[in-house]
Image (cartoon, helix red, strand yellow):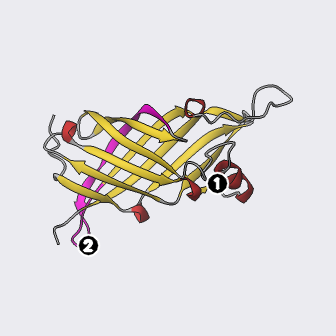
Amino acid sequence: MTATALTTGTWNLDASHSEIGFSVRHAGISKVRGSFTEFDATLTTGETLADSSVEATVQIASVNTKDANRDAHLKGEDFFNAEQFPTMTFKSTAVKGDAGEFVLVGDLTIRGVSKEVEFEAELGGEAVDAFGATRVGFFASTTISRKEFGITWNAALEAGGVLVSDKVKIEIDASFVLATAE
C-alpha cells in the first residue's frame, strides 16, 4: 500500500479553504448544523499511507451554529465547557486502506476525555495551484456518541424522546499546503 498519489513531507492546514462541521438531531425531527471557525492541523505523509499521520486542534470557543444563545450554551458547562477545556484535539494512530479511500483511526479528545474514533476518508487529490504551492485535499466523516465524551445535558420532550440526540456527525473538508524549506 503506497502513497504514490501524494508527495511525502509535512503539510500545513490551509484553514481558509477548510471546514470542520457537525450536525445533531434536534427534537427528533430536524438537524442543527454548526462549525468551528478556528482550528489548525499538520499532516505528515510518508512513503506508505500507513506511515502518514495527522494532528489537529480545534478552539472550542469558535463554535458557530448561527444562533448566539445556542453557541453560548454549547460553550458552557452543559456541553463543551470551553473555559475549562478550551480545545478539542485529534491525533491519528493508524491509517488503513489505500490512497483513494481510507480509514483514519485516532484519538479524539473532548472535555478531557479521549476516545478512539474512525474517520471514513477520501483523498480529493493533489495539485500545484496558480501560485506554485503544492496542495492536497481530503474529506472525512465520523459519528460519535457525545455521552462518551461526558456531554450528557438534555431535556425531555412532552411527546417523548429528548431535545438533543446522542449521535453527532462530524464532517471535515481539509486543504493542506506542502511546507517548503525557507
The residue labelled by disc 2 is 130
Q: At 60% from the left edge and 34% from the top edge, which residue is drawn?
A: 150
Residue 146 drawn above or below residue 54: above
Residue 47 numbered mark, or none? none
The residue most toward the top is 160
Dominant secondary structure, magenta: strand
Instruction: Give percent across and percent down for residue 113.
Output: 51, 36
**Element assignment for label 1:** loop
Name the quarter where the N terminus is drawn: top left
Query: Residue 135: within the magenta?
Result: yes
Query: Which quadrant would the C terminus be assigned to in this image?
Result: bottom left
Residue 152, percent from left and from top: 66, 33
Task: Tell me which amino acid carries mark 2.
Answer: Ala
In front: label 2 or label 1: 1
Mark 2, secondary structure of its residue: loop
Residue at the (26%, 57%) spot, across then down? 11
User: The magenta stretch spans which residues?
Assistant: 113-136
Residue type pointed to by label 1 = Thr
Which residue has dot 1 on it? 65
Q: Earlier in the sequence, mark 2 or mark 1?
A: 1
Residue 66 image point, x, y percent: 66, 58
